Amino acid sequence: MPATPLTDDVRLSPADDVPAEEARLTWYARPAGTAALLLITSLVALTATIIIIVERALLTADPTHRTSCDLNPWVSCGQVMQSWQAHTFGFPNTYIGVVAFSVLITVAVSLLAGARFARWYWLLMNAGILAGFAFCVWLWYSAVYSIGTLCLYCMIVWAMVIAQLVLVTSRNLQTGTLPAPAGLVRLARELAWPVIVLLYVLVFASILLELGLGVIGID
């Protein structure tokens, strides 16, 4: 049967002052945990995005500028920044990141302040993160198989979005925001972290298989 959605009037468990229904959730599916997850991952991703913006401004001002992540022929933010994929919609992709991660930081701070959001809001946020993940998948494919060069700061953003998608989806399944059979909810609770690790491994493996060991400095 689908998991029962949590309500705001759930009484506290006398044992630990945690709402009884929340006690069965993983730490990241509880309000404070979700807030911490969104805040940390979004701050990391936003920082990486801002660095890209600064580096691009320096590169625009001085075409000979060597960016801080121009590490080797395979890891070069400067080369990626000059590709058309860096302006997919006619403006720098970083603008999307600044807006998206700022929104998620606002959500995180609101949760820490005690705000609670309606089911439709969580579904909309889940859909938004899914769209961001799909965009990251396309950027990964472009970088690895088309451009043939990686942007270190972009990969940091990819890593944060992967974690956000898996854990927020798991949170929504556990709380009943996304109705699902009990078996699927259990899998979402138990396999969220292994899925994240698996996705990281797959991305890393695809990079090594396509670009070679030179990416990590091995000739």
Image (cartoon, rainbow, N blue to C red):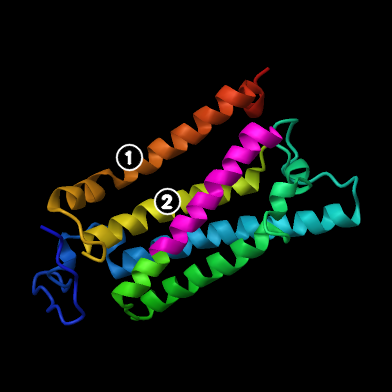
In terms of depth relative to the viewer, which is nearer, 146 or 56? 146
The quadrant the N terminus occupies is bottom left
Residue drawn at (56%, 23%) of the image: 209
Element on which disc 1 rests: helix
Q: Residue 217: image x %, image y %? A: 66, 25
Residue drawn at (64%, 48%) of the image: 153
Q: Which residue is mark 1?
A: 194
Ranked by sequence position, the earlier of labels 2 and 1 is 2
Residue 18 is drawn in which quadrant?
bottom left
Q: Which residues are magenta?
A: 126-149
Residue 1's place in the image compared with 142, above or below, is: below
Q: Which residue is mark 2?
A: 163
Residue 26 is drawn in which quadrant?
bottom left
Q: What's under tag 2, amino acid-wise?
A: Ala
Compared across the picture, whether 138 is left or right of 115 comes to right
Residue 155 visible? The answer is no
